[in-house]
Image (cartoon, helix red, strand yellow):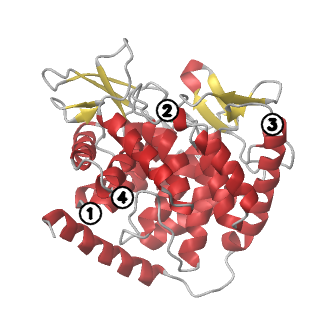
Amino acid sequence: MNPTTSASTLWKITAFAASAILALPAHSDELLDRIPEVFERAAGQYDHMLSMVESDTKIPRTIKEDGSVLTVGPKDWTSGFFPGSLWFLHEYDGSEKWKDKALDYTRRLEVIRHFKDNHDGGFMLGCSYGNALRLAPSDEFREVLQDAATALGTRYVPSLGMIRSWDNPLFICPVIIDNMMNLELLTWAAKNGGDQKLQEIAVSHADKTLANHFRPDGSAYHVVDYDPETGWIRAIYGWQGADVQTPWARGQAWALYGFTMMFRETGKQEYLKCAENVAQFLMNHPNLPEDLVPYWDFGVEPGADVPRDASAAAIMASALLELSTLSDEGAAYRDFAAKQLLSLSKAPYLAEPKTNGGFILTQSTGHLPKGSEIDVPLVYADYYYLEALLRYRALLNNETRLSFGEVK
Ligand code: GLY
């Protein structure tokens, strides 16, 4: 047993003890009681959406202005979320119907198994094939995931110790906070017969992100552009946020989720501390609305006309539920996430049947500074919402529910 393994074993025991202490006796719980109705609504919505895209070989992402479904090809960064959500519907009811749909949409991504165009391979193939492997284990899925991890690893810049997020001529070597989410593919691959170097890449990337992407208040910058020759930071950008010094809501949620996941994967205490700092920053922010669904950027003046970002709330809730099993502050994180999920589980966020292009949640914001996808349904909001509900159900029922990156 090497030192990494023994540290990982130790934290898993600690995490188990923490979750055992947190486990609640069976009793009525407002959110838990609501989950069957929400999944019934979700299934009805996806039935509706699938009937609208029956002859389309692409993958749902959002809606167009006329209310029809906007679909995208496998190389779009969001391509893994719809198959992932179909796997969650199968996970919920065990039906062959959702498994068949999930398999169909998952296999539409096989053509990108060697994807190297940007850092998003983890989102695209982890959320699709990763859930496929978790719920219907097969070598077919393992092999695609190993190829995807190898391809992502080629984006590592050794002189920087980081993965280059984008090949965009506006930058030299840009790294975005979202990139943390893609590291789970690498840690999974290293633990499952892949190159051990992939684990080192994931840890190095997380270490450098920790060092360079955070403000003293615990919030994260979106884009940091590096000079790979000197290792120096050339510039920092607000990009999808309002300003370089304002906390873009979804970026904070990616940071929270990414560092929680990397603590789970490595047991490194500094990752836990980082996740806890982000959590405290978000949970105590004066601009967080009473229903706990953030405005698109925490730095903008709150107001009735300011767009919300339901996707940020869903990602944050899912991350807080995992963090609740790993941190001494577990109960506070779990209760906060439950309140967010209760808000998302009713109007105006939970879509009325056969509206919203068949998506489950309304009111997400994609890229406001670009004028793109403002106050619309977004496929990744649905994905993290369903994941969070399944995490919550498992937590309260004291059941084990692993993510794809965890080894059984
Ligand atoms: N990864 C892109 C986004 O969060 O919008």
The correct choice, above or below, for 224 with respect to 205 in the image is above
Looking at the rendered structure, the secondary structure element under dot 3 is loop
Foreground: 144 or 369?
144
The answer to whether marks 1 and 2 mark residues whose Cβ atoms lie closer than 8 Å is no
Q: Amino acid at mark 1?
A: Gly
The answer to whether marks 2 and 4 mark residues whose Cβ atoms lie closer than 8 Å is no
Q: Amino acid at mark 2?
A: Ile
Looking at the rendered structure, the secondary structure element under dot 1 is loop
Question: In this figure, which residue is indicated by the disc labeled 1?
Answer: 267
Q: Amino acid at mark 3?
A: Glu
Looking at the rendered structure, the secondary structure element under dot 4 is helix
**Mark 3 or 1, which is nearer the eye?**
3
Location of residue 140 in the rendering, given as x and y in whole percent from the top left corner = 49, 50
Residue that lies at the very extreme toward the top in this rendered image: 169
Question: In this figure, which residue is indicated by the disc labeled 3?
Answer: 54
Question: In this figure, which residue is indicated by the disc labeled 4?
Answer: 276
